[in-house]
Amino acid sequence: MIALARATFVTALLLVLAAHAHAKNDLFDLEWKELAPGVHVGQRPDPMRYPVVCNTVIVIGSDGVLVFDGGGFPTQGDQVAAKVKALTPKPVKFIVISHWHGDHNRGISPILDAYPGAQVVGHEFTKAAMLGAPMQRIHKAEVAGDARDTAEAIRKALADNKFLDGSPLDPAERPFFERFVADNVAHQAELARMKITPPTIVFDKELYLKLGDRTVELRHFGPANTKGDAVMLLRDAGIVASGDIVVAPIPYAFGSYPSNWADVLKQIKATKYRVLVPGHGPLQSDAAYVDLLIETLQSVAHQVNALVTQGKSLDDISKAVDFAKVEQRFTRNDPILKRFFDLFFKQPVIPAAYNTAKGIENEKLTEDAK
């Protein structure tokens, strides 16, 4: 998927447009591919479509099944449970959550309904964030009146052929937002079904889960996209699933840890994977995109740290950081990719790096006292 700012934006925009929407039946449909014997990945073909849908991995061993990132929406969880049943009579033993963002976990309840003996697994910070302020903030935003305040502004912006920030819409963006509107009814139906289902098993640095003859390795390489990212390694198949440490074609940087994120990506690259399954987007068979992420995050962290040392304000730093060497390599001059590179990466990555440099918490587990 989603960190607070991204989730608030997506939820507000969809709620506003709901009255005018016509659902498309394929909004949450997954396409399945076998990556190796007993390893299957489900993906939505268009990773930029809204709402975002995470990639799901099913791992089958001799005595059970593990699901990695079973889904942010119950319809996705329904499909995952049905796919497991079609593949094997073995039970789901583990549902692993890569991180706390809801587009990776708030739709796993149908899998647990189908396999009530399954354990939910995640990093200890992931559990704390799901039970604490980060996840609760998102839940409150969905039921609060924020969408009402946003409604008229969005309607006017679209009527004026503008985006929320007042910038003009490129003509090539209109089909994207037309589909965005049409998809809204299906999204709204899912919101009512979503549940917070925190881990029942937590780990700190590493955890090995047995599926009979197959061992699934979970690693926490350090803070990256969140403070609790879990990476799945299938050493026997050369497959790594990264969660949102890797997202393509546009990375998500809300509340992230840019400098350390680059270091974590280096550790993932060092596994010499055959296939990398990102949190969203196409499978990776080489390190080209990972290298681009590393270069970009290191550049941002270096620039922000230098400007913080000079005593610059966040506002001044936001205007000064230069993305010229990397931006087009992400966006390829596509207007939608340009729009969301700004929204999902450029805007949030600078305050994330600034907070890290200043020792300010990016993911507070408790609300500030009033």
Image: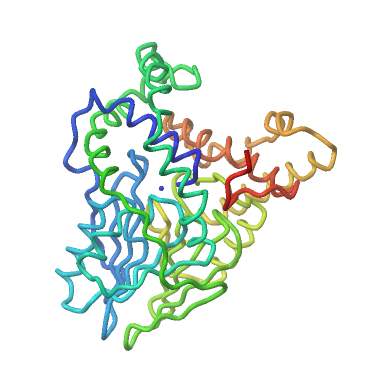
Give whichever of 280, 105 is nearer the camera. 105
Give whichever of 94, 370 is nearer the camera. 370
> Residue at left 22%, top 51%?
75
Going by the picture, which residue comes out furthest to the top?
Answer: 160
Going by the picture, which residue comes out furthest to the right?
Answer: 310
Quadrant housing residue 37: bottom left
Going by the picture, which residue comes out furthest to the bottom?
Answer: 213
Going by the picture, which residue comes out furthest to the front?
Answer: 370
In the displayed structure, does residue 261 sit left or right of residue 252?
A: right
| Residue 12 percent coordinates (x, y) | 39, 31
Q: Relative to 16, is 349 above or below?
A: below
Give whichever of 203, 137 is nearer the camera. 137
Task: Name the image quarter holding the C terminus.
Answer: top right
> Residue at left 47%, top 36%?
332
| Residue 104 percent coordinates (x, y) | 38, 55
In the displayed structure, does residue 247 sit left or right of residue 158?
A: right
Quadrant housing residue 268: bottom right
In the displayed structure, does residue 67 sit left or right of residue 274?
A: left
Q: Relative to 72, is 212 above or below?
A: below
